[in-house]
Each structure stands twice: as structure tokens, then as C-alpha cells.
Amino acid sequence: MAIVHFKKSLETLREIYSDNLSVPLIAEDLLACPLDGDALEVKQYMEESDFDFYGVESNGKIIGYIVRTELKDGLISEYVHPFEMDDLISESTSLIELLQIFKDKNPVFVLEKNQVKKLLTLADLQKQPIRMLVFGLISLLEMNLLELIKKNYPDDGWTQCLSDGRIEKAFEVYEKRKQKNEGLGLIECIQLSDKGTIIRKTPQLLEQLEFQSKKEVDRFFSSIEELRNNTAHSQEYVYDDFNDFLDSITRIEKLLRVI
């Protein structure tokens, strides 16, 4: 019964992070200029305001957008990109879904009651709600991996996979927590990298988690450890390369489905 309860708790947490964190948390209001505006004047304003994209308004409705780098002489009407269906997303779109959308589109625009009101660019993925999402997904993965390791290694049999130095580090954490009356076992005191090592040295876990090689395990755990560290420090970028970032998040989602 305890295992069932734990799994349901993890599912609830996953729903919170995957479904309830949605695009309004990071979207910016889409400002707009008129169709007959002077393109160079608008470009200067966009440069001063550090805007890459700007809305274009006609008859009180935003009908498209302009790109700062495209603006030259003439009127705004000469540079308008009318909205296409794949430019638009619903305000209920989750942040997880947004990451996949950004694989093919940048920027995207948020549709609210048949009106385009907000926009999103890749720069918005550095905001705090994205940090919450990433940190939460990695934490969920760690919790699931912990249960998986316990299931495959009862009675602390997993210790055979780690070096004496790593076991000693785990014991140091265990003793500190024990002094604070935190009722945790030794396995709760190992690091994310240690979980990766255990998986790499356990053939049945390699197969279950669909890793193709031990090197792949090392690369994955190294990437998500760096990602977690970045999200924990607000002065750091969440990611440097979007495609690598998306690959890591996609793999985390895949692992959460197969565990």
C-alpha cells in the first residue's frame, strides 16, 4: 500500500509540473504599432527598448508582427508577417508543450479569447517558472530512480556499485541528517551522479530505462546535473544550447514514462 501511495504522490507532483505550469507565467504583453507607422521610427524604438518582435495593429486588433532586423525605409505595412496557425498557441498550453513548440517556432503568440495578446521568445525560457519546471522534473526523476534502485537492490545491495569514497560521502550526509532526527536511510543520502553510476553498472536497469550504452548514461546524468545546478542559481542561464536543453528535458519525460 505504501508503494501505491508513493506512486500516486509522484503522479500528482508530475501533473503539477507538467500540466499546471502554463505559458501565461512567462509570456510578455504584445505591444503594437499601426500599419501606417514609419518603419525606421519603429525600428529605432524597438532598438532602444530591446524588442526583437513587435505587434502590428489594424482597426483595434493585432493582425501580425514585425521583425526588427527586417525594417528599413517605408511603412510598417510593407514588413508585416500575418499570423499563421502555427504561430499561435492557447493560453492553456503547458510549459512542457511550449518547449517542444520552440523546437520549430520562435517567436510564438498567445491567443486569448480569439485575440492575440502576448508573445513568447526563446529568451523567456530563462525565467523563474522554467527553473521551477526543470528543477521539479529532475527532482521527480530522482525520486523515481530512488524507488527503482530500492526495488532492484534490497538491503542496500546497491552499495556494491559505488566506490568506497562515494559510500563514505553518503555516510557523512547520513550521519548529519541522523543528528537532526531526519528519518532517512543511507540510499536517500546518495547524489544524482551516484544514481547514474548504479544504473550504469546494473544491466537490467540499463535495459529498463532504454539506455543504449554506459557512455549514454554518463552523458545524460552529467547534463541533468549541470542543468539542475544552473536552475538552482538564479544568476546562471538555465541553458546555453536550446537543442541540448530540449534533448535533456525530452529524455527526462521519457524516463518518467517508463519507470
Image (cartoon, rainbow, N blue to C red):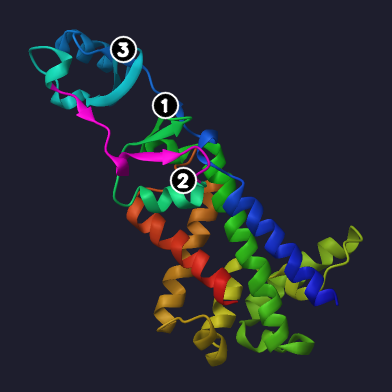
Dividing the picture into quarters, in which one does residue 120 lie? top left
Discs 1/2, front: 1
Please say whether residue 44 is visible from this viewpoint. yes
| 221 with respect to 148 (left or right) | left
The answer to whether residue 122 is magenta is no
Mark 3 or mark 1, which has the lower sequence index? 3
Residue at label 1?
115
Q: Nearer the viewer, residue 211 or 93?
A: 93
Residue at label 3?
59
Amino acid on which the number 2 mark rests in the picture: Val
Q: Position of residue 212 (x, y in %)?
A: 40, 83
Amino acid on which the number 3 mark rests in the picture: Asn
Mark 2 and mark 3: span between their CA atoms? 40 Å
The answer to whether residue 91 is magenta is yes
Q: Which residues are magenta?
A: 79-93
Amino acid on which the number 1 mark rests in the picture: Gln
Q: Nearer the viewer, residue 85 or 155?
A: 85
How many labels were placed on the picture?
Answer: 3
Please tell me which residue is depicted at 59% across the width and 46% down the height of the picture: 132
- Judge whether 190 appears above or below 53 on screen: below
Q: Identify the secondary structure beneath mark 2.
A: loop
Dividing the picture into quarters, in which one does residue 60 lie? top left
Q: Identify the secondary structure beneath mark 3.
A: loop
